Amino acid sequence: MMNVENVYPKVQEIIADVLVIDAVDVSLKSRLIADLGAESIDFLDLVFQLEKEFSVKIPRGQLEKNARGTLTEEEFESGGVLTAEGMVALKNYLNEVPEEHFTPNLKVNEIPMLFTVETFCKLIIAAKAAQPAEAVTA
Amino acid sequence: MSELLLANRVALITGGARGIGRATALKLARSGADIAIVYFNSSDEAEIVVNEIEALGRRAVAFQANVADHASVKDLFKAFKTHFDTLDILVSNAASGVLKPALKMSTKHWRWCMETNALALNHLVTEARPLMPQGSSVVALSSLGAARAIPNYAFIGASKAALEALVRSLSLELAPDGIRINTLSAGVVDTDALKHFPNREELLDQAEARSLIGRTMTPGDVADGVYLLCLPEARLLMGQTLFLDAGFSVTG
């Protein structure tokens, strides 16, 4: 069974590789942007590398979609800012992120600032679980 | 029903899941070609395009690759060869970049733009050439930013200028094999890429005002331009940059 612990070493290695930093500087709790200096182009490369390594599909915007859960876009955000309901959904999804990082009036385009290494581990596990059974064993 | 001028041809389009790449894939498929599309992050969209092409009665396969990385392009062609024996049309359309003033850019941004938008063509042509018969055509997609100053577009513009120069040199090197290569420089088209421009509205307004057809261009307009460059009648167009911009670059 895939879990954060057994996915993490490879994720750590790939993140270090993409960001051209030492793997020892990457921890499960590291925030990609604030702590590791990731930029938007790094996320593109990172997702590509993770898809290849773990043989999963991570469609564009999947993290945001996962965060929204069952909410519609209108329920999740208003004018680019998260609604109260949206904030609850986001905190629920990103439950690995410390409470103090969720600033009030968080904008949708600021959500990536919250992403940690663990967020990506969970994303892979979810993507793997969403695959048809035969694809998992392939 | 008119004759399908690209029947029995195989075309590969990078960035083929969305926008201009998608429109090009569909145009070439409607003209009779079987299609390979290459995508980077857009797996869902790639699957949709494959289904659309198959519904037209053509073959379609989607491949994931990072065209900026030569090893990834090698893997792409290894996979391509398990599906197709030949490649008649190569469309280098995938592009990416960082939109910021040049004075706020880093070396990393430079490399990202140059490698994705210019160097990728060299990787693609290097791997594709042995599969391309006499009469094949390569089309690289550029933009007006290659020769004009557009706010925040400095590094992408530089990469497109490099691309156009590379196309001229490659035309010399590919000519002995009977392979033509040209650049199609498209005007402003409202695709997902344009959503990243802070001045998107302004660009669209300018494009519409200076367009000689009274409207902005669509991805389908650009796809038609790619199609023209692939026709046998374009046989003496070599190393050129064709401006497809509804007159934008010659007015105002």
Image (cartoon, rainbow, N blue to C red):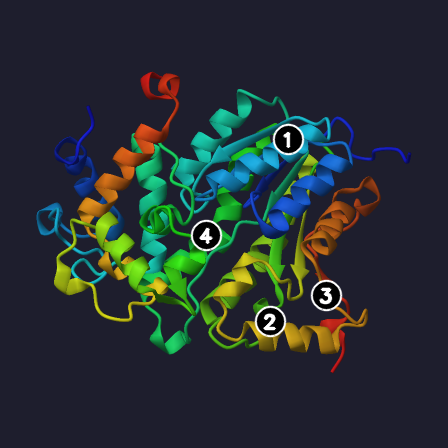
Q: Let me know if marks 3 and 4 both belong to one chain.
A: yes
Q: Nearer the viewer, mark 1 or mark 3?
A: 3
Q: Which residue is mark 2?
A: B147
Q: Let me know if marks 1 and 4 both belong to one chain.
A: yes
Q: Position of residue B129 (x, y in %)?
A: 59, 34
Q: Which residue is mark 1?
A: B87
Which residue is outermost to the bottom? B252
Amino acid type at image mark 1 = Leu
Crowd rating for badge 3 (residues with CA inside 10 Å; few <14, some 14–19, many 20+): many
Question: Dots 1 and 2: beta carbons under 8 Å?
Answer: no
Q: Nearer the viewer, mark 3 or mark 4?
A: 3
Q: Which residue is mark 4?
A: B116
Q: Secondary structure at mark 3?
A: loop
Indicate which disc, 1 or 2, sits on the residue closer to the N terminus.
1
Indicate which disc, 1 or 3, sits on the residue closer to the N terminus.
1
Please determine whether, in this image, residue B47 is positioned above or below residue B211. above
| C-alpha distance separating marks 2 and 3 | 14 Å
Q: Let me know if marks 4 and 2 both belong to one chain.
A: yes
Label 4 marks a residue whose chain is B
Amino acid type at image mark 2 = Ala
Q: Which residue is mark 3?
A: B245
Amino acid type at image mark 4 = Thr
Crowd rating for badge 2 (residues with CA inside 10 Å; few <14, some 14–19, many 20+): few
